[in-house]
Amino acid sequence: MVSKVLHIVVVFNGMKWLPELVESVQASRTGDVWAIDHGSTDGSWEWLTQRLPESDRHQGPNHGFGSGNNRGLEEAIRRGVDAVHLLNQDAKVDPQGMAQQVEWLMSRSACGHRLEVSSPIHWDWDGAQPYHHFDKHYAPRWRKHQQPFEVPFIHAASWLMTLETVKSVGGFNPAFFMYGEDNEWAHRFRRLGGRFWIHPKASLYHDEKVRPWPKTTVLERMAYAEEVRGFFEGTLSAEHWSSLRWWRFVRRATHPDRWLDVVTGAMWRAEREALRRMKADVANWTLLRDAMNQQTYPHLNP
């Protein structure tokens, strides 16, 4: 029996990549491409209407990358597919490797390993060089492996997982509009005993350019993500959580590993911005947390 995968793509002005993305996935013969367009103005939606059946293409308000993927995960649950594949719009797969990766994941699941995410080797769009962050941060020793190997984390440019994993962990937290949602999801995933794997026989070609973000931006996103995780894992009211913000500010800013960032001022600027965002968003987090606690699958409502 051939496993059925729903390949989920969130689209926003992705016309540059969509033809090759869809062609590569369809050539793998592993399942359907399901795309949600978030208001593209470059012809992406018009192209999708010509290439995908009506049931596999949707338009919706842009509530963020995670929320778009959540719509696809909800559709996967409704269809009862074997697995889902989250794929960035600026990427394409190696069809044969994709098929091998699906077969490997499903064989693992059949043996009882049901909380796992598999991702391929990440290359640049032309396949000339490994993707920088993959090579330097996520899997720096990938060249030494001939068989699938475990890593602490891999970003969500290409995540393949069983439907059981989706039901266990749920969707992305809508508190994140873009960036950070995959880290927060991974936090919940690992708490349940989940594991990330890299499949060396599969390849992803990713056109994302490395962006040298300022240190303040990186620190602000880290602080904001910690605020979100802490709030959603606890039971404090929004008012009580906000009242403790300066204690959390000082605790992070005085961490021994951050002394240089404190001296340069990057830590203080980042913390102020993170807490400004938190204070503006925390009231909505209460509604999200209440809804999550009432849903069968966190952040999903099939």
Image: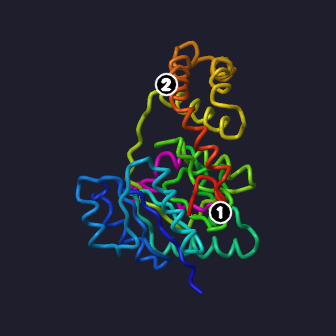
* Mark 1, other Cα within 10 Å: few <14 / some 14–19 / many ≥20: some
Compared to residue 55, the image places residue 297 above or below, namely: above
Q: Nearer the viewer, residue 169 or 2?
A: 169
Q: Which residues are magenta?
A: 116-136
Q: CA distance from mark 1 to mark 2?
A: 36 Å
On the image, the x and y values in percent for residue 219 come to 54, 28
Q: Is residue 294 left or right of residue 26?
A: right
Which residue carries the number 2 mark?
216
Q: Quadrant of residue 22?
A: bottom left
Compared to residue 263, the image places residue 146 above or below, namely: below
Which residue carries the number 1 mark?
167
On the image, the x and y values in percent for residue 31 come to 48, 76
On the image, the x and y values in percent for residue 289 come to 63, 43
Which color scheme did the rendering employ for the protein? rainbow
Residue type of the residue flagged with mark 2: Thr
Q: Nearer the viewer, residue 245 or 226?
A: 245
> SS of the residue at dot 1?
helix
On whether residue 25 falls in the magenta region, the answer is no
On whether residue 126 falls in the magenta region, the answer is yes
